[in-house]
Amino acid sequence: MFTRTPRVKISTKELEYFQSDDEKQIGFVSVDNIDGTYHALLFDRNSLGRYQIVDMDLDHETIDEARSSLAEMMDNYVPDEKELQKGGKAVDLFTVVAEKSQIHPNFIKLKDEGFFKAAKKVIEEVGYHHEDIDGNFNDQLQSINGFDARIWELYLWCYFREEDFEFDTTHDAPDFMLKKCGEEIAVEAVHVKRTQGLDEEMAQMEFQTVLEKLRNEMPVMFGSPLYSKLTHEYQHQKYWELPHVKGKSLVFAIADFHADMSMTWSFPAITSILYGIEQMAEKDEDEKVTLVSASGNKFAKKNNVEISPLFLDDQYKHVSAVLFSPCGTISKFNRMGVQAGYGDSNYTLFQVKMCYNHLENAIFPNVFFNVIDENSHETWADGIQIFHNPFAEIPLNPLLFPHAGHHFYKDGVLYSQMPPNSIISSTTWNIKNLPFKMRNFSFHTQEIFDNIVRQFNL
């Protein structure tokens, strides 16, 4: 779950992992990145729920010597309970602290239902390491007004840790102060708030309705919270004026929670509200695909106030980039949990994901149907997209985020650097007591899709 400190990777490379029968102790054999010797290290859980080093034997000439040493350590290990209790009490995110009338129904599902067993376990593990800077994380995670925002923050924590960032938790705001390779950046999490009622059924929208929403409604829905963060003050200062942020790249990380499944289709509105462009793929007479960009778009709110694209507004020069993902949901935690071995055999998780298609002349995305199990290779980075501000006073270094998709604007055109199979949209099916075995398959053209539809009568 990427809960160990990234600096471990600088000095050593972990090669093999071992566990005690009760899974309480873990050990690993590593190789020293400098002198090539092998190390054996043993860890036990302390009272904070974190793994604490309890024994080590370093600088072996061969890996077999390190393995033998670790086996002997584990055979002879006797816990020092007094030492392990020194840290205090572990964080328990699932002890109810919110007012009963204010508890989010999705928190109750996460806490109690078997469908989300794997997600709950992942969040428990992450909770042992996540620092509650402002002191109200538990209450907000459980509440109607805070659940979506806190899930999004937990997801970002996991992604930043996976990208080997370290966290400076000495400041209350912005949400994340990150360090890596001698560089520091600030990240403030923001989300599009829910407008659909919690007991309201998901709307079944026609494709044309989605297009209409993407042209004006969704850009404004993304733009409002992003602009609010720009004007927000903490201790009477804007984020970029804070002493610990000044001179560093500032990133706003946004997710769309306005309605059930909205993340699966709202992605294009980000480029509209940030750059004022709309892109369409067209085929010419020779069947060659060209990308047609319409730039200079503006948007109107209900009171007829015209909104300019954010990155083209001089006020937004203080924001280096906007980070977005369609994957920062409970389903993501569920999939990562099943992959990590926390799943329940009574439930089958099946992901349908649309990914960027790198084939020349491609219009159709790569589409994958994957059964999630311990052989899956999903990462927290899957789906992360970073939109760079071309007019930022302090640009963001894209090399700090090697597993994200990066988007750059120049002269009315958006240029994108996308990792293989970068997720555009993802849907997860969670099925109990499935009476047959599912299999994986994929396609990247309309013809293959039509054939699959005929074959399976989907």
Image (cartoon, rainbow, N blue to C red):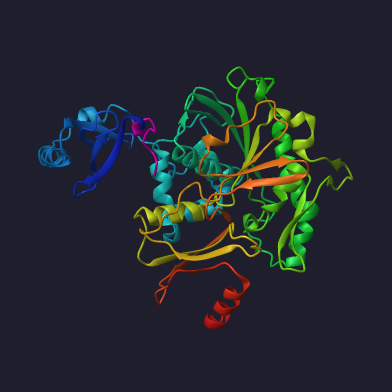
Q: In the picture, residue 246 is in which quadrant?
A: top right
Picture residue at 50% right of the left edge, 56% below the top: 331
Taking depth in this image into account, of 274 and 157 the one nearest to the observer is: 274
**Numbered range of the magenta stretch:** 1-9
Left or right: 373 in relation to 288: left
Image: 361 above or below 217:
below
| Residue 196 percent across, percent down from the top left | 68, 56
x, y (%) of residue 428? 52, 62
Q: In which quarter of the image is the N terminus?
A: top left
Whether residue 25 is in magenta: the answer is: no
* Residue 266 in the figure: left or right of residue 346: right
Left or right: residue 206 versus residue 402 is right
Magenta stretch mostly in which secondary structure?
loop
Q: Which residue is drawn at 36% across and 30% down?
A: 10
What residue occupies the far right of the structure in this picture? 304
Q: Where is residue 439 in the image (x, y as percent from the top left)?
A: 43, 72
Q: In which quarter of the image is residue 324?
A: top right
Residue at the top extreme of this rendering: 243
